Amino acid sequence: MNADKHLKSWQERFELAEAMQPLLGKLYRNQGVEVVMYGKPLLNASTIEIIKAHRLVRRFVGDKLRLRESFPFVEALSKLDIKHCKVDIGKLAVNYWRNHKDASNIEAYMALELAQGINNDSDKEPKDVVLYGFGRIGRLLARLLIEKTGSSNLLRLRAIVLRGGRKGDLEKRASLLRRDSVHGPFNGSVYIDEENNAIIANGTYIQVIYANSPDEVDYTQYGINNALVVDNTGIWKDEDGLGLHLKSKGASKVLLTAPAKGSIKNVVYGVNHDDIKPEDTIMSAASCTTNAITPVLKALNDKYGIDNGHVETIHSYTNDQNLIDNYHKADRRGRSAPLNMVITSTGAAKAVSKALPEMEGKLTGNAIRVPTPNVSMAILSLNLNSEISKEEVNTYLRDMALHSDLQHQIDYTESTEIVSSDLVGSRYAGVVDSQATIAEGKRATLYVWYDNEFGYSCQVVSVMAKMLGLTTLSLPNS
């Protein structure tokens, strides 16, 4: 019967996904190898999430990738002496089956394709990380660092620094990490050590430190040395202010999760991360919007050339706005965020040139804050140097999302039904909505979604790794 056929197929996929899970876990815990499926992480994924990741392959390449076709590649990977890499098992499997009819050469194929990882110099020491501030971005950074807990994890979250310290504060901080109204519950266990003022999350011991100024903490008394301090407060944005962190014992570098002022480098990972030098001690990860639009702008400028353009961001409301009408020093931001669309300014368009100098003076920008708690959109209205069509520009951006050096920053969707809530939890800097693309002559308008919290936090983690010399090799090569 037809119904039995579908049920049998589902059970086969389910069992293969279950068999995959321990292999994926061991690869990361023991070897530092993170397995992805066309960019979608499989580490800590449920059986259903693994099955859904395989279904997405058809959207990218037009062909199915069955679990029985990918499972032998995970098995072969688990037998290789490969370390500290991100391996896209989907791309490897699709490429193999397009050129082979049986599985007899899979192990040899994998050894050849992943040779760089097998010879990878992976004898790197773990680095200490401190989160200074524990708001929206701070807690998401904590989740991202904790999800990779294990002996092979080289980015070690050691402490969070907070102001205050009133009775009950520790439990409330742990509760905010445990539950999130937008991103859902924490994937694991969170409890507190009240006696030692610490939060333990999935085995990660996080010291909670209370301080009123960046320069008054002695991290060494907690066994923290040469730490990267990630400032999520947004209070200090120039070299003098952020430099206060470096006066604390045990701190060696500082990363700001906001646009910086002065001569501090603003980095959009994937675009200008090579500007980070070992001697740099203070860096900025720019803004969520700058991270969302700069990779797409770079891709378009490299291919077609951008003469000029305008960026309009439709941005979810933030903590900076009021829940109900009240005083605010900025124009219009005092009006109720959940009840109004609020026109405001954005520095993202101008900030693009700090990461992509060839865009200097070419973009204007504005913003509209809207009554949604997360996921925003950037509308890029561009005048190009060459004529294009909708089909041409979409095909190009799809290829950039799959096979370029920007594949971890740019995502691409062909869905005609996607809305903002579907993008909550997206790990990409930006997602090109191909169905909304408009292109005629030398003019193009593109719509780029972005999870302004989680997607941005993923970019921040990449900058953190680069600052600490812990960048991960991605295989197969673009």
Image: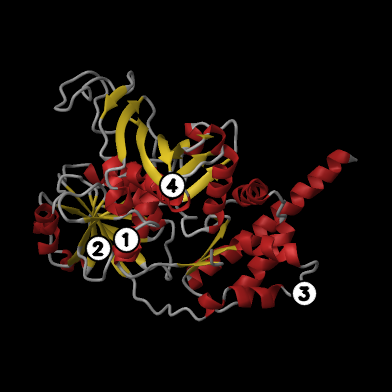
The alpha-carbon separation of the residues under discs 4 and 2 comes to: 29 Å
Camera-side mark, 4 or 1: 4
Which mark is nearer the camera, 3 or 4? 4
Could you classify mark 2 by the number of other residues whose Cα lies within 10 Å: few (under 14), some (14-19), or many (20 or more)?
Answer: many
Q: Who comes first in sequence, dot 1 or dot 3?
A: 3
Q: Is residue 349 visible?
A: yes
Q: Amino acid at mark 1?
A: Met
Is residue 410 shown left or right of residue 104? Answer: left
**Where residue 464 is drawn, which disc sits there?**
1
Q: Which residue is mark 2?
A: 228
Q: Which residue is mark 4?
A: 296
Q: Secondary structure at mark 4?
A: helix
The residues tagged by marks 4 and 1 sit, at their Cα atoms, a distance apart of 22 Å
- Residue 178, how many percent across, how many down? 38, 44
Q: Are marks 1 and 2 in contact (CB under 8 Å)?
A: yes
Q: Secondary structure at mark 2?
A: strand
Kind of residue sitting beneath label 4: Val
Asked which secondary structure carries label 1, the reply is helix
**Which is more toward the observer, 175 or 296?**
296
Residue 174 seen in render: no
Select label 3 or label 2 by which is in front: 3
Q: Tell me: 51 left or right of 155.
A: right
The residue drawn where x is 36% and y is 32% is 312
Q: Tell me, yes or no, whether the two marked residues, 3 and 2, touch with CB atoms within 8 Å.
A: no
